[in-house]
Image: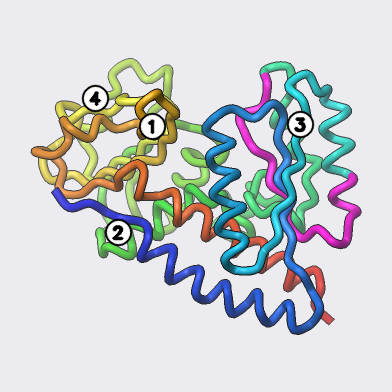
Amino acid sequence: MRLLYGRPVAERIETRSGERSAALQARRVAPRLAVVSVGADAAANTYLGRIVARGTRIGVAVDDVALPHDASERDLTATLERLARDRAVHGVLLLTPLPAALQGARVADRIAVDKDVEGMNPFNAGLLAEGRPSFVPSTAEAAVRLLEFYEVPLAGVRAAIVGRSAVIGRPLAALLLAKDATVTIAHSKTPDLAAITRDADVVVVGAGRAGLLRGDMVRPGVTVIDAGINVTPSGLVGDVDAASMTTVAAALSPVPGGLGAVTTALLLQNVLTAAEKLTAD
């Protein structure tokens, strides 16, 4: 089984991002990302740490805007509106999932469209659905970039996505459709998940359940992209039971070592794009 590592993909993106950041700095523009969280969980904190480290490498400042777990929707929207007005901030990322008391879809409306580097605002989500993407959720785009880098065919293939979140499953479906794949989305209400995944040439899983996808649920020769991040006592694991996949799959993106670095590189690339547009003469 071939392992699809993300590092070479991320390094290619970051090389260009470093050049773009330097060009902005030469114009006295300091690219800055504000990461907003409400009682962030362990997986979200892991992601934030990676963003800060990678941002430092390419010259993008990252602000940790952490609200307490009991923050109200008014508190959160006020924070997002303040960041929308702050000319020193070029990108805004709202970490999910949010506490159950907060209406995530409604809150996303308050992220400034031109700073919405994760493509969560309905305006940017709509552009992607229409095939005219602006800012695209970085994990979804990372899955496509990884497949393309390793020359996995997409046109005409059957692709199954496990998970229907607004940051992975749904945007990824739009991206794969644009690559001429035939796409099926499975989710928690799908009665027979294995019937869907066994029929696919490419499976992407991002449901947030460790070990959800097993080797007996896919066909021989499948390519599997693991977009899950689960913090366990033994470390980070994905949504794929990697041990059972080794004798079945042709290729698998590992966790850690797969999508994570690419996701972060693309997010920071979006911050640079926002900074360039917001400060254009």
Identify the element where label 1 is drawn: strand
Q: Residue under circle 3?
A: 106
Which sits earlier in the primary sequence, circle 2 or circle 3? 3
What residue range appears in magenta?
82-99
How many angstroms separate mark 3 from mark 4 (CA)?
34 Å
Q: Nearer the viewer, residue 259 or 50?
A: 50
Give the vertical position of 150 relative to 108 (above or below).
Answer: below
The image quarter containing residue 134 is: bottom right
How many angstroms separate mark 2 from mark 3 (CA)?
35 Å
Inspect the magenta stretch and tell me whether residue 95 lies in it.
yes
- Identify the mark at residue 265; answer none if there is no mark: none
Query: What is the quadrant of the C terminus in the image?
Result: bottom right
Q: Residue under circle 2?
A: 155
Q: Give coordinates of residue 190: x percent, y percent.
A: 37, 20
**Residue depicted at 60% across the width and 44% down the height:** 48
The image quarter containing residue 216 is: top left
Identify the element where label 3 is drawn: helix
Q: Residue under circle 1?
A: 235
How many angstroms separate mark 1 from mark 4 (CA)?
27 Å
Q: Residue under circle 4?
A: 194
Label pair 1/4, CB-CB below 8 angstroms: no
Label pair 2/1, CB-CB below 8 angstroms: no
Q: Is residue 274 visible from the viewing direction of this image? A: yes
Which sits earlier in the primary sequence, circle 2 or circle 1? 2
Q: Give coordinates of residue 5: x percent, y percent.
A: 31, 55
Which sits earlier in the primary sequence, circle 4 or circle 2? 2
Nearest to viewer (mark 1 / mark 4): 1
